[in-house]
Amino acid sequence: VGFKLNEKLTETMGYQISMVLCQYETLRSYLFSLVSVGNGDQHMLLKLLSTVSITMGFNTLICILFDTIQLSTLHVRIISAVFQHIYCVQLTTVSSLWKLFRGKKVNILRNRTDTLEHVDFMQLLLGMLLFT
């Protein structure tokens, strides 16, 4: 019981995820070096944020914190978008093969599914082999 992935696919996806994480770590370390949050600089950063919230309002502080959270979860959103795209492509492919197996096709111009009257046997055989 379970889902067994293709070893090459798993290896490629793992490599791509590690590359995204490596690039994100490089970006994060560069941004932290610009802010230079180090040994005694936390108090300076806290004073800066409190000064910004006093002079520009509490909403500005909330916006800065929200943007910080968005930047800190950027890698998760990128990986999620890539997996979502892969899933949509696979779902579309399986849907097209299932319709081919049933003798139907998608009419893009009229946005509907039509039946095929003249189904090529080789096309149907190829669709069945790809689907199974």
Image (spheres, rainbow, N blue to C red):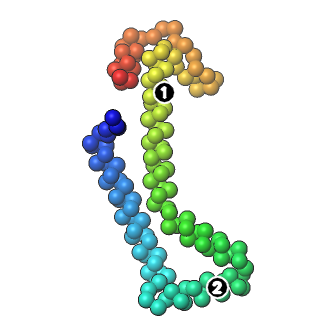
Mark 1, residue position: 95
Quadrant, the N terminus: top left
Q: Residue at x 72, y 81 (%)?
A: 56
Q: Nearer the viewer, residue 122 or 19?
A: 19
Q: Is residue 26 above or below residue 120?
A: below
Quadrant, the C terminus: top left
State the image coordinates of residue 107 (x, y, percent, origin top left). Answer: 57, 22
The three-letter amino acid code for the residue at tag 2 is Ser
* Residue 5 shown left or right of residue 63 in the figure: left
The alpha-carbon separation of the residues under discs 1 and 2 comes to 55 Å
Q: Residues within 10 Å of mark 1 (few under 14, many from 20)?
A: some
* Residue that lies at the very extreme toward the top in this rendered image: 117
Q: Residue at x 31, y 43 (%)?
A: 9
State the image coordinates of residue 110 (x, y, percent, origin top left). Answer: 64, 23
* Residue 21 shown left or right of residue 58 in the figure: left
Asked which secondary structure carries label 2, the reply is: helix
* Residue 55 shown left or right of residue 126 in the figure: right
Asked which secondary structure carries label 1, the reply is: helix
Q: Nearer the viewer, residue 5 or 75?
A: 5
Mark 2, residue position: 50
State the image coordinates of residue 15 (x, y, percent, origin top left). Answer: 31, 54
Q: Residue at x 71, y 74 (%)?
A: 59
Q: Is residue 48 above or below residue 111?
A: below
The three-letter amino acid code for the residue at tag 1 is Ser
Q: Foreground mark, 1 or 2? A: 2
- Give the quarter of the image for residue 50: bottom right
Q: Residue at x 39, y 20 (%)?
A: 127
